[in-house]
Image: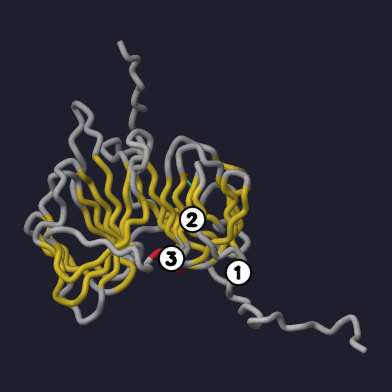
């Protein structure tokens, strides 16, 4: 006779404690989740004028009206790169290195970026990229059509890294919720921000933020449950979340280490009108 405390191993074995319970892709009107397992799976893309590269498109404008950005995960093999990486004169970009080494030439100046390296590239900026190292280079490429404003010059290119920019604690959070801002929020030349958000274990966004800014969130480190448009989803390092404007969002960071993500948002511009048809 079995006592009531006997546990049985289910067919196929028990999942490891590190495994998420909700490891699945989700696509809704308000948000999408692309789990790491499928993020860099078979859906590989390539681009003209790039050598030894492959990439995965993880966000793109869908409706032709509402969404503002696209995001790629790019891998460049040793010796690969591009002399003509961007073909669209209106595109601004942020490049964020997650592994390997990037040689970036911006307007004739050479920069070497390693993991955590960050580059902002305004529209019409002349840049080239190579991987001169022995390892595969992996980086995020976030692109948006820059919204010019009369009387305001486009921003200058710059290169920095997450180690060189101090994270700022959100008010009344005792530092358990911090944001690394690579651009001054008051700098009106910028119409997109790509920040890093960090929570210590147990840290929360304690209410459902609901705002017009869209988001791309790529989880760099750790685990959490995210509350998206009324549903709880588990996410961990390597997962991507795409949030439409106004998608209600809050989160609870699980342990044991920090939960960090790269966060895209559109900022600082008037909203377009839908003009009545005559
Ligand atoms: N989901 C988020 O991290 N949202 C940020 N608080 C933000 O909108 O800046």
Q: Position of residue 93 (x, y in %)?
A: 25, 50
**Mark closest to the chain's N terminus, 1 or 3:** 3
User: Residue most toward the left?
Assistant: 108
Under 8 Å from ligand 1: the CB of mark 3? no
The residue that label 2 is drawn on is: 33
Question: At 21% across and 68% down in the image, what residue appears?
Answer: 53
- Contact? badges 2 and 1 (CB < 8 Å): no
Q: What element carries label 2?
A: strand
User: How far, Cα to Cα, is label 2 from label 1?
Assistant: 21 Å
Query: Where is 132 relative to 38, above or below?
Result: below
Q: Which of label 1 and label 3 is nearer to you?
A: 3
Between 159 and 238, the one lying in front of the other is 238
Q: Position of residue 237 (x, y in %)?
A: 47, 67
Q: How crowded is mark 2: few (under 14 residues within 10 Å), some or many (20 or more)?
A: many
- What numbered label is drawn on residue 38? 3
- What numbered label is drawn on residue 80? none
Q: What element carries label 1?
A: loop
User: How far, Cα to Cα, is label 2 from label 3?
Assistant: 10 Å
> Residue 152 lies in what quarter of the image?
top left
Q: Where is residue 107 in the image (x, y as percent from the top left)?
A: 9, 54
- What numbered label is drawn on residue 255? 1
Between 38 and 196, the one lying in front of the other is 38
Query: Where is 144 relative to 4, above or below?
Result: above
């Amino acid at each position: 006779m079995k006592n009531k405390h006997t546990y049985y191993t289910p067919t196929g074995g028990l999942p490891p404690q590190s495994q998420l319970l909700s490891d699945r892709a989700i696509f809704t009107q308000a948000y999408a989740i692309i789990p790491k397992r499928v993020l860099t799976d078979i859906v590989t893309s390539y681009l003209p004028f790039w050598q030894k590269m492959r990439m995965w498109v993880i966000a793109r404008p869908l409706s032709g009206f509402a969404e503002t950005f696209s995001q790629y995960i790019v891998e460049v093999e040793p010796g690969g790169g591009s002399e003509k990486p961007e073909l669209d004169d209106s595109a601004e970009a942020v490049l964020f290195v997650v592994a390997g080494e990037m040689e970036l030439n911006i307007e004739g100046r050479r920069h070497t970026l390693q993991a955590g390296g960050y580059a902002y590239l305004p529209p019409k900026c002349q840049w080239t990229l190579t991987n001169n190292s022995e390892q595969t280079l992996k980086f995020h490429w976030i692109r948006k059509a820059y919204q010019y404003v009369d009387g305001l010059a486009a921003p200058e290119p710059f290169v920095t890294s997450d180690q060189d920019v101090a994270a700022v604690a959100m008010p009344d959070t005792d530092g358990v919720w911090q944001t690394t801002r690579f651009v001054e929020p008051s700098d009106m030349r910028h119409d997109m921000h790509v920040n890093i958000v960090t929570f210590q274990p147990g840290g929360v966004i304690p209410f459902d933020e609901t705002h017009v800014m869209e988001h791309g969130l790529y989880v760099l480190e750790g685990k959490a449950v995210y509350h998206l448009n009324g549903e709880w989803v588990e996410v961990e390092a390597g997962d991507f979340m795409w949030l439409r404007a106004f998608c209600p969002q809050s989160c609870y960071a699980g342990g044991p280490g920090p939960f960090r993500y790269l966060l895209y948002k559109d900022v600082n511009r008037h909203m377009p009108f839908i003009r009545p048809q005559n």
